[in-house]
């Protein structure tokens, strides 16, 4: 009797902007998801690849970290912003993929920028989808952040009286500008990372180590397939 093939490893990929930038790197790493993966209308969430030992799942960027932290996916790609927000100890991030380059910043209305001394504040209202990062950032300055948790369109919050400041991602700055805001402080630089589940890496070091090596080779410009 032949032994059953081991279950494929699961690679969690974020839908949205990172995925677009990631496609060439996936190809260089020799990963070709099945045709449905490219079909944005497909309702499938899990896809086979050209390698029977690897399946891909397509989830929201924040959820990539959750799937990998819990070992539901063994490997993933997500932004350093997401890793900072959750700080999961089960996640090991061995590679900076150099894509999804942006920063997590504080922004405020351009009309009142620089007019107030933040050092004198004890509290501030902040709209963000990064409550932990915001709390930590302002706490380090002795300011208690009262966070209004939004999932998008943070830029509307100051003008509509929801919060004084926002903490959000900035790349070109055009979203801030279009909404009358200005970047006042950079909290951290962000790129996307390859992440792996620590337990999976311990129990399947060869298989997962080989995928890390393939991504590393792909980054260095060679084809790893
Ligand atoms: N303007 C940007 N420029 C570069 N990278 C960005 C930018 N905005 C977000 N990112 C990176 O892409 C990741 C996903 O972005 P975001 O949370 O906006 O999701 P999305 O691509 O809009 O898709 P979804 O909201 O459906 O998950 C972020 O965690 C961040 O690392
Ligand atoms: O500095 P910029 O180049 O303007 O980029 C910044 C914008 O990009 C991200 O939003 P995204 O486009 O992903 O929309 P969403 O967060 O509403 O999904 C981020 O939340 C900012 O709104």
Image (tube, rainbow, N blue to C red):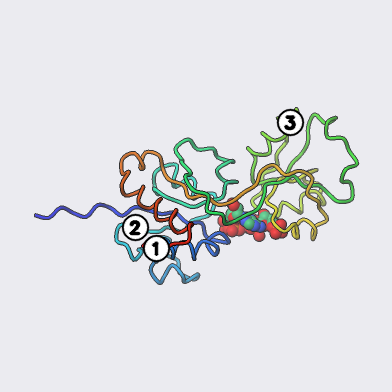
* 2 vs 3, front mark: 2
**Disc 3 element:** strand
Residue of label 3: 144
Q: Residue 152: x, y in percent?
A: 66, 54
Residue of label 1: 31
**Disc 2 element:** strand
Q: Earlier in the sequence, mark 2 or mark 3?
A: 2
Whole-number angstrom distance, CA of label 2 to CA of label 3: 45 Å
The image quadrant that residue 122 belongs to is top right
Residue of label 2: 54
Q: Residue at x 32, y 62 (%)?
A: 51
Label 3: how many Cα within 10 Å (few below 14, some 14–19, many 20+):
some
Label 2 with label 1: CB-CB less than 8 Å? yes
Whole-number angstrom distance, CA of label 3 to CA of label 1: 46 Å
The image quadrant that residue 28 belongs to is bottom left
Label 1 lies in ligand 1 vicinity (Cβ under 8 Å):
no
């Amino acid at each position: 009797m032949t032994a059953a093939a081991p279950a494929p490893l699961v690679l969690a990929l974020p839908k949205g902007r990172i995925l677009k930038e990631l496609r060439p790197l996936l190809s260089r790493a020799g990963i070709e998801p099945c045709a449905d993966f490219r079909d944005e209308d497909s309702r499938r969430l899990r896809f086979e690849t050209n390698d029977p030992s690897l399946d891909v799942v397509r989830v929201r960027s924040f959820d990539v970290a959750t799937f990998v932290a819990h070992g539901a996916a063994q490997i993933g790609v997500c932004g350093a912003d997401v890793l900072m927000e959750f700080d999961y100890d089960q996640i090991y991030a061995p590679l900076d993929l150099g894509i999804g380059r942006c920063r997590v910043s504080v922004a405020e209305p351009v009309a009142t920028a620089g007019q107030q001394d933040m050092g004198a504040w004890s509290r501030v209202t902040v709209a963000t989808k990064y409550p932990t990062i915001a709390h930590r950032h302002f706490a380090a300055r002795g300011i208690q952040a009262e966070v209004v948790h939004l999932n998008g369109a943070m830029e509307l919050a100051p003008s509509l009286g929801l919060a004084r400041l926002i903490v959000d991602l900035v790349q070109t700055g055009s979203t801030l500008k279009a909404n009358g805001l200005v970047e006042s402080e950079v909290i951290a630089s962000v790129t996307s990372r390859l992440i792996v589940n620590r337990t999976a890496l311990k129990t399947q070091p060869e298989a997962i180590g080989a995928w890390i090596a393939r991504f590393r080779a792909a980054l260095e410009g060679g084809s790893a397939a």
